Image (tube, helix red, strand yellow):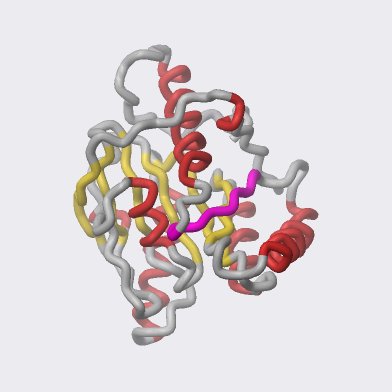
Amino acid sequence: MFVRHFFCETAHGYFIVQISSAKFLCSAPDLDACPVGSLPEFAFIGRSNVGKSSLLNLLAGEHGLARVSPTPGFTKMINIFDINKTWRLVDLPGYGFAEGAKKDSARFNKAVANYLKCRESLSLVFALVDSGLPPQDMDLEFIEWLVRHGVPFVLVFTKADKAAAAAVQANIAAFMERIAAWFVQPPTAFTCSAQSGQGRQELLGVIDETLTAIRAQAGDEFAPAPAPKKRPDRQRPW
């Protein structure tokens, strides 16, 4: 039971994908209501109040693309955004949100699980973890679920500017130690801050690397990224 390591070398001169257009496409209550998977999708998910919507806005360069709310668990639908008309960002409901009835929480958790397991156009998951906190059981359980179901992902430790650097590094090290036994090689991890912009280029670099691999797998490096008939080849290192 393991997920292959994702190699990202954006610091070594790899092209960073440029976002020329970003617009809201739809909100779907479940997998069946999602639009046809015609483009590669990059999903973002994390515990409530992890800063997911703020990070999506940072990546897209659109302040109001994903609605940011002070209320944990505001996102309750699968929100899909069209980027450059060639790929999509997906804002998934956070797990463990405080507001709403338990039956709603369970329903949305099931919808998210179905999306993550069955959405063929899902290319990569960005699993968000609050870097200002020590390892949380809810985050660890979710990462273990991704590993168990073979969902490709990278870790993103958010809010890197909200705590002392030493505390952030200690929390990240503790988290990586807790999950180390689940992997042949540990998953790639990034730190980011929606406020300062830290991590934006690296995350866009990951997206560009993935899109390039999808194009290469389709046999046409220069065509707009096509919809994969299946998830990227698991033999690839991501």
Residue 229 counted in the magenta span: no
Left/right placement of residue 82 relative to residue 139 reads: left
Q: Residue at x 33, y 30 (%)?
A: 227
Q: Residue at x 41, y 43 (%)?
A: 122
For residue 99, above or below residue 111 = below
Q: Position of residue 189 (x, y in %)?
A: 63, 48
Residue 190 counted in the magenta span: yes
Q: Position of residue 79 (x, y in %)?
A: 28, 57
Q: Position of residue 203 (x, y in %)?
A: 49, 42
Foreground residue among 233 and 130: 130
Q: Residue at x 35, y 13 (%)?
A: 222
- Image quadrant assignment for residue 30: bottom left
Q: Position of residue 112 (x, y in %)?
A: 41, 61
For residue 19, above or below residue 165 = above
For residue 56, above or below residue 216 = below
For residue 216, above or below residue 157 = above
Question: Which region of the structure is painted magenta?
Answer: 188-195
Q: Residue at x 46, y 17 (%)?
A: 216
* Predominant SS along the magenta part: loop
Left/right placement of residue 142 relative to residue 25 reads: right
Left/right placement of residue 64 relative to residue 184 reads: left
